[in-house]
Amino acid sequence: MTELTSLAVSRSLDAELIPMSQTCDILIVGGGVIGTSIAHSLARRKVGKIVLLEKSFLGAGSSGKSGAIIRQHYSNVLTASMAQKSLRVFERFDDLVGGPPVFTHTGMVIVVNQRDRAGLEANVKLQRELSIDVRTTSAKDLANLDPHAKLAEDELAVFEAEAGYVEAVQVVASFADSARRYGADIREGAEVQSIVHEGGRIAGVETNQGRFVCKTLILATGPWAARLGAGVECPLPVQACRTQVALFRRPPDFAQRGPVYGDFVHGIYFKPTHGEMIHAGSLAGEELKDPVDPDQYNESADNAWLPQVRQRLSGRYPMMQGGYGRGGYGALYGITPDWHPILDRLPGLEGAYCAVGFSGHGFKMSPIVGQLMAELVVDGKAKTLDISPLRLSRFAENDPVKTPYSYGVMG
């Protein structure tokens, strides 16, 4: 072999070992429901080459473990409107996005103590003004709706007729499949290690698969948001926290599947799910007491926590004292100080955006978030709704999104 040939072979081997830069117009980081929804909305607009990078597999973070309850019960116009517009998409998801139907219609019951009457009545008024079908529900009404449920004399309930839940994993897969059909490139196993910027403008990212060069970057990184923001001196106040889910099999004589519940009295939400099961979790906001490393956290439910959930569930459903425990699991929230998301540009870094900090609300809002972020990036401003209340600077300005509920996760 000549010296020239040997040098050529050496360079060829180096090229195989060192990935070359890859170029796109818009790069999305995060393959959960928010990232894939944004990819779907942008790809449909045919605004150039779109690449989505996911460090593991699609839905591997918060999205794949979500209860994916779809409700409109929010206490301010913006978030209620976001939930309302998203529900309309979920109802026709197979037509509007593709794939199989994902929405199960159950309705949702919200139960509060008498002391929360003012907040509940204000929310009902607000929602009715938005044409959301919600109404007060007496103990007799609830018994007709769900004969297994118990409502005490000092409790108040409302029923949101259009609510339900979706199949979480299928939603993520369908958003991703739609994005691919419109030409987006979705890469799994591509971990972003740092953001590259030059002269105050986004230039790309470094990954385990080499550098990706882009003009526009969107962070949809859920509980991992703060890490990448810190690397470009843009603090994102998103705390990765562990939440828990308990699963119970309904007794054989518990024949009728009930609605979804937001039970403030007992501090839990729960919903029917596959295989005669009930999926239950907390509304008490204790997730903030359990900050975690999102790459290393306990993915099992605590043994001491599961009996507590059974007891609280039985307070609403007495028959669930005889329900069959099926364990549970630990999952992740990315929580902001006001429990509401950040949809904004990243200050001081032209071409960079974020859709993070959903604090347990992400699935409910994901279709409209994709649309709003596409508008912000392509048109320069979100047009469908005014998202300025969700700007990053609200925290420094002491202007958080407010809710009359003391349970942040309900919004």
Image (tube, grey):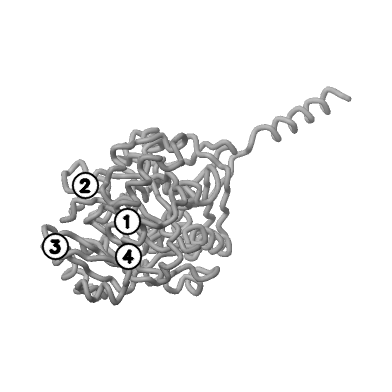
Q: Secondary structure at mark 3?
A: loop
Q: Which mark is residue 154?
A: 3
Mark 1 vs 3: CB contact within 8 A: no
- In the rendered image, the residue lying farthest to the top is 3
Residue 388 lies, with reference to residue 190, above or below; the image says below
- Under mark 4, the amino acid is Arg
* Real-space CA distance between mark 3 and mark 2, rounded to the nearest whole angstrom: 37 Å
Which percent across, then down, holds residue 147?
31, 72
Among the two numbered marks 3 and 2 on one chain, the one whose residue lies closer to the N terminus: 3
Q: Residue at x 28, y 60 (%)?
A: 316
Which residue is disc 1 drawn over?
A: 313
Which image quarter is the N terminus in? top right
Which residue is disc 4 drawn over?
A: 71
* Real-space CA distance between mark 2 and mark 1, rounded to the nearest whole angstrom: 37 Å
Mark 3 Cα shell of 10 Å, populated few (<14), some (14-19), many (≥20): few
- Under mark 3, the amino acid is Asp
Which percent across, then down, holds residue 130?
23, 72
